[in-house]
Amino acid sequence: MKFLSYIRDLLSGRIYYHNKLIGSNVIKLLKNVQKRPKSDFIRMWVYSCVGYIDSLFSYLLFKENSFKVNIYKLDKQKMFDAFQLLCIHFVIVFLKNKGNLAVLHQEGLDAETFMNDIFSVFNLTIDRAKYRNLDAAFPNDSPKYFVELYDEIFVNILGAPSKGSLGSSLVFAQLLTNAYTSFIKELNVDYQT
């Protein structure tokens, strides 16, 4: 049965589009991380972050689920924009944890240097005011934050049909929370070994 599913995906172009939209951006980011940060910790952080973003988008865009996006209308840049937004989310959540700030301190890093190094790998020249707005919204109004993040990624960037879909944004929030939790567990294991 899996073989027939693979043939269907191959013939429909889904595998090609997966490689074009997600695989090419993963390769781009992995090349960037090799050139930029000097810190081994930041490299590990980026490798883990990229892996979890890759897995999340592979599921959301290429598996049967409730997220309806026409992958054939997407391009690499739109997908990269979505990668960038999830990177910002991972940075926001990471920096909200005082234990993570202690780890950065042990590594000789401060929050600003960490954020700048991560953002440079993701080619983020994001307006600091927009980052601060996202950062401030996260702990104060999490439901609104996740609805806005969902709308920005799925509606504005990826072209999903419905804005403000509470059900979809709740499922997205849960998937994103699970991805981040797994990411941080893996990072802690990698960091400690």
Image (cartoon, grey):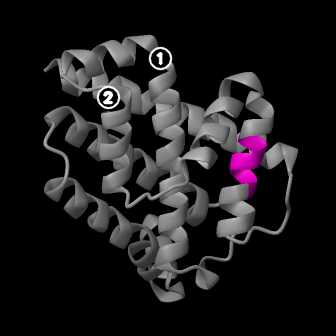
Residue hosting label 1: 97
Count the marks: 2
Task: Note whether 122 is above or below 21 in the view shown.
Answer: above
Task: Note whether 88 is above or below 54 in the view shown.
Answer: above
Mark 1 or mark 2, earlier in chain = 1
Query: Quick one: SS at disc 1?
Result: loop
Residue hosting label 2: 186
* Residue drawn at x 51%, y 55% as measured from the top left: 126
Q: Which residues are magenta?
A: 146-151
Q: Quadrant of the C terminus?
A: top left
Which amino acid lies under the numbered mark 2 shown in the image of this protein?
A: Glu
User: Which one is in front in this view, the residue at disc 1 or the one at disc 2?
Assistant: 1
* Residue drawn at x 37%, y 18% as measured from the top left: 100
Horizontal side of residue 8 vs 31, given as left or right: right
Task: Note whether 132 is above or below 185 in the view shown.
Answer: below
**Which class describes the residues within 10 Å of circle 1: few (<14), some (14-19), or many (20+)?**
few
Task: Place residue 117 in its image quadrant.
Answer: top left
* Residue drawn at x 37%, y 33% as measured from the top left: 112
Residue 84: x and y, percent? Answer: 48, 56
Determine the main secondary structure of the stretch shown in magenta.
helix
Residue 63: x and y, percent? Answer: 58, 61
**Which class describes the residues within 10 Å of circle 2: few (<14), some (14-19), or many (20+)?**
some
- Magenta region includes residue 178: no
